[in-house]
Image: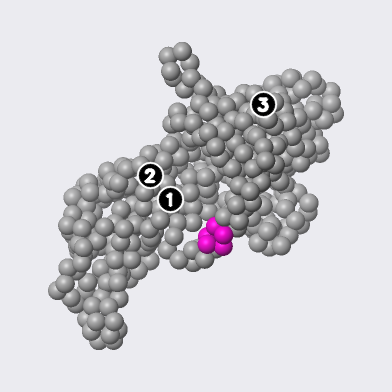
Amino acid sequence: MIDGAILVDQDARLVWSNDKHVWFSDKQIAMLGFRSPADAIGQPVERIIPHSRMREVVETGRSLPLDIMRYGEHTLLVSRLPLRDEQGQVIGALAFALKNSLTYLRPIADRFNKLQSRLTRVEQELAASRASQYTVENLIGFSQPMLQVKRLVRRAGQIRSAVLLLGETGTGKELVAQSIHASSDRAHRPFVAVNTAAIPENLLEAEFFGVAPGAYTGAARQPRPGKFQLAHGGTLFLDEIGDMPLPLQAKLLRALQEREVEPLGSNQVIKVDVRIIAATSRPLAEMVRSGTFRSDLYYRLNVFPIQLPALRDRKDDLEILAPLFSEKIAISLDQPMREFTPAALDALRQHDWPGNVRELANVIEQVYVRTEGERIRAEDFADILPSAAIQPPAPPDRKRSLNAAMDELERALILESLEDCRGNKLEAARRLGLSRTNLYAKLRKHGIASHSDD
């Protein structure tokens, strides 16, 4: 009955599969850049199956005995089980795909497809409303910093305390906030976001607490609810909380402590039930010491802090983020998707990304708009990224040692061969007259990424 099976270790990396076409069709192997299913061994399972729940099984130790999932062109009935050693510690997980059994479960499968279609329509309708649009699965990356963020997000979804997201601009704080909301018991309730830096100071109180009829000249005759009322029962996301003026900080603190708000121009107190997620790119601890941010509000918000890593601190994720943005931008521009040459990815790794993931998306969109070709090459970034990101050939340096000159030439020849072979390392090794083992050794020696295989 088993049509496909995979085994992962305690770090959710693939250690075995039965090589069935369920997981490793020729199309899927080509998309992943692998020469054969064996080349996927050792890779994070999410790279093979983007929305896999195997990491959840490993981390929680709980089995998922029956699940229907879509993978490529297949609809699979999947069973996931944790593996334990003699002491009861989780050492991995095993997943079985029972694809053929769907023939006998056709009524359930048809029901699932109908519910899936209905869910898709509902999601489209809710996209414009106050519903979370992202989940933990939308947090892309398998670097250690991102795996830690995902663990904290799952933990934050299990508790009801306030969460404080810290990180530079462009690191995806709202995406993380929505993921926390979606994994909490408030997921079916509203998710309301407000950027305190984008609202004029004299309107902030009305935005937060609402306005009573006739509160001021020009006010509507009907009461206008504030963000607290709109988020009742759900989550209120306070973005750029560090830019909130001190007078409003005191009123916000009272609303959080008393769980009630008083609309502008009203004497009526309204009870509210909201879960607070705050975010800032500013150093709140330093602002507390300097007196520009209230210490009592800081301690109220800083219950469960999550530090979001900058893109420069997780450059291993570039090889999955860059193709993802390339695919999305190609669809939005109605153009064929363009793959990255090894030299192009190398150029991206050399950039520091002060604008983080938001800057990466912008750079790739600029490449689509300003350049042409079947693939994205390193030269396409010449007028987009700072000149330091594209390393031109170094002028002759007569003071260099012979070994340094030979290393530089060797690195340039390897990059050129990889680009000509479209990243196929076996073919590149043949052209260079090297064994595959020797090529991989030289890739490590010269700091050339070798995550994608033949």
Q: Along the line of sight, which residue is nearer the eye, 363 or 62?
A: 62
Which numbered tag is attached to residue 157? 2
Provide residue 391's location: percent of width, then percent of height.
Answer: 66, 41
Q: Tell me what residue is drawn at x 16 percent, y 72 percent.
A: 268
Report the side of 326 relative to 202 (left or right). Answer: right
Location of residue 111 in the rendering, given as x and y in whole percent from the top left corner: 60, 52
Cα gap from disc 2 to disc 1, whole angstroms: 8 Å
Return the residue nearer the eye: 107 or 298.
Answer: 107
Amino acid at circle 3: Ser
| Circle 2 SS class | helix
Q: Secondary structure at mark 3?
A: strand
Residue 182 shows which numbered tag?
A: 1
Q: Is the C-beta separation of discs 2 and 3 under 8 Å?
A: no
Viewer-closest of 158 and 400: 158
Circle 2: residue type: Gly
The residue shown at (63%, 48%) is: 107
Magenta residues, start to end: 118-123
Q: Position of residue 11 (x, y in %)?
A: 52, 27
Question: In this figure, which residue is indicated by the disc labeled 3?
Answer: 17
Q: Are marks 2 and 1 in contact (CB under 8 Å)?
A: yes
Q: Quadrant of residue 402?
A: top right
Give the farthest residue toward the top: 86
Amino acid type, residue under disc 1 in the picture: Ala
In the visual, does 42 lie left or right of 358? right
| Residue 90, numbered label | none
Q: Residue at x 78, y 34 (%)?
A: 424
How far is mark 2 from mark 3, CA to CA? Answer: 32 Å
The answer to whether mark 1 and mark 3 are in CB contact below 8 A is no
Q: Quadrant of the N terminus?
A: top right
